[in-house]
Structures are given as structure tokens and as C-alpha cells.
Image: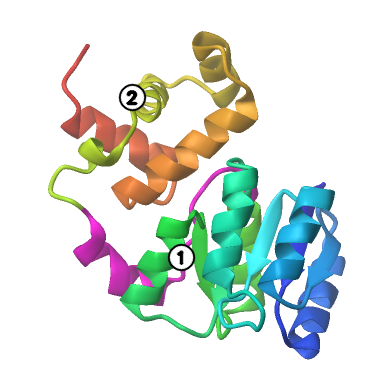
Amino acid sequence: MTTVLLVDDHAMVRSGLSALLAATADLTVVGQARDGAEAVELAGRVRPDVVLMDLSMPVMDGIEATRHIVAANPEAKVVVLTSFSEAAKVTEALAAGAIGYLLKDGEPDQLLAGVRAAAEGHAPLDPKVARVLLPAARPARPEESLSARELEVLRLVAKGLANKQIGRRLGITERTVKSHLGQVFRQLGVPDRTSAALWARDHLPPQ
């Protein structure tokens, strides 16, 4: 069961999201926050698998809240859910540590798929956001933005190893492997491990 924390200053939005998630068999809401400060406090207490984070809120906005939550728990999966699709907002949110960025005008199924993808360490991006962000955001050499450990994980993915096998090989938990993969997906601008493996085979020198 994937646990979800809802963060939005509008009660009707939280209610709608809660009802949508309650209708699934594999997702459950473990908390609701009205602003960023409340989200930080709740996230520390309930440690949800995924945080659905609004951006524009009183007291503390979603960017700052995301920064605090990820700093306290680097494995936290924060998915922004907002009405803003400007490249600057997206870039700022991802830089703060968000793993994904979805829009409120998206389809319910797309939102549920995004929550599930984030829980698995993938990086869900609304197609409108991807069109705005990815062409400008990808560096000429994306591998330069990856840490040594993230490159290790990427190379093992390219060799066909599962997350559990990668964790054993590197002496880290499977959850940490998923966290590293989420960062790899974001930096390479790819949606899943298959695309990441193909990218690695095409761009990384053999070892």
C-alpha cells in the first residue's frame, strides 16, 4: 500500500483528491496539510511514500516545503500538483527536490499513474510540462550532472540488474536505489528504467 500526504490550501481540492485516492486499492491518504509549514510537520510524523504538493500556499509555499521535506528525508517522493506550467516554476520545484510535476487540469487516471510512478522511483511529468521544460533543461552532457553513485546505479540498470540486485551489489537499500533512479530519470529527461538503460548504452563509455 502506497501512503500519500495531500498538501493544498483549498479544502475542496483536498477533498476531491482524497476521494479519488480512496477509490483505489493500492493508495491511501495518511494526512492532509493546508500549507507548507503544516506539510513539513506532517511529513516528518507520518513519513508518507508520496507527497502531492501544491505550490501557491500561505505561511510556506510548496517550493520551500519541498526543500524542507527532502532535506529531512532524501528518499521522500514529492510530486508537485499545481496549475502553473511555466518553465521557471517547474525548474525551481525540481531543483528543490520534487521528483515529479503534474497539472491540476490533467485526467484523474494520469494523476493516479503519476503517484504510482513516483512511489516506484520514476519521475512523472505532465506532457505539457515536459514540452516546456525538457528541451531547455537537458545539459549537453547529462551524465555530468549525476553523482558517482547515481552513475553506478545507472550502469547496473543498463546491465539489466533489478533494484534489489543493485542494492546488494552496492550495499544500499532497495529504497535508496529507487531514490537514485528518480534523480537519474530527472537529469536524463527519461520516463523509465528502460529508457535510462538505452541512454546509458548509447552515451556512457564501457567499463
Residue projecting furthest to the left: 140
Q: Residues within 10 Å of mark 2 (few under 14, many from 20)?
A: few
Which stretch appears magenta? 119-138
Q: Residues within 10 Å of mark 1 (few under 14, many from 20)?
A: many
Q: Is residue 126 magenta?
A: yes
Coloring applied to the structure: rainbow
Q: Position of residue 87 (x, y in %)?
A: 32, 75
- Front residue (pair 32, 161): 32
Prevailing SS of the magenta stretch: helix
Residue 148 is tagged as 2
Query: Is residue 23 shown to the viewer in this render?
Result: no
Q: Position of residue 57 (x, y in %)?
A: 63, 82
Residue 150 is tagged as none
Q: Disc 1 designates what residue?
A: 93
Q: Is residue 100 left or right of residue 8?
A: left
Say what secondary structure mark 2 lies in: helix
Q: Residue at x 40, y 38 (%)?
A: 194
Query: Is residue 101 shown to the viewer in this render?
Result: yes
Q: Residue at x 77, y 59 (%)?
A: 41
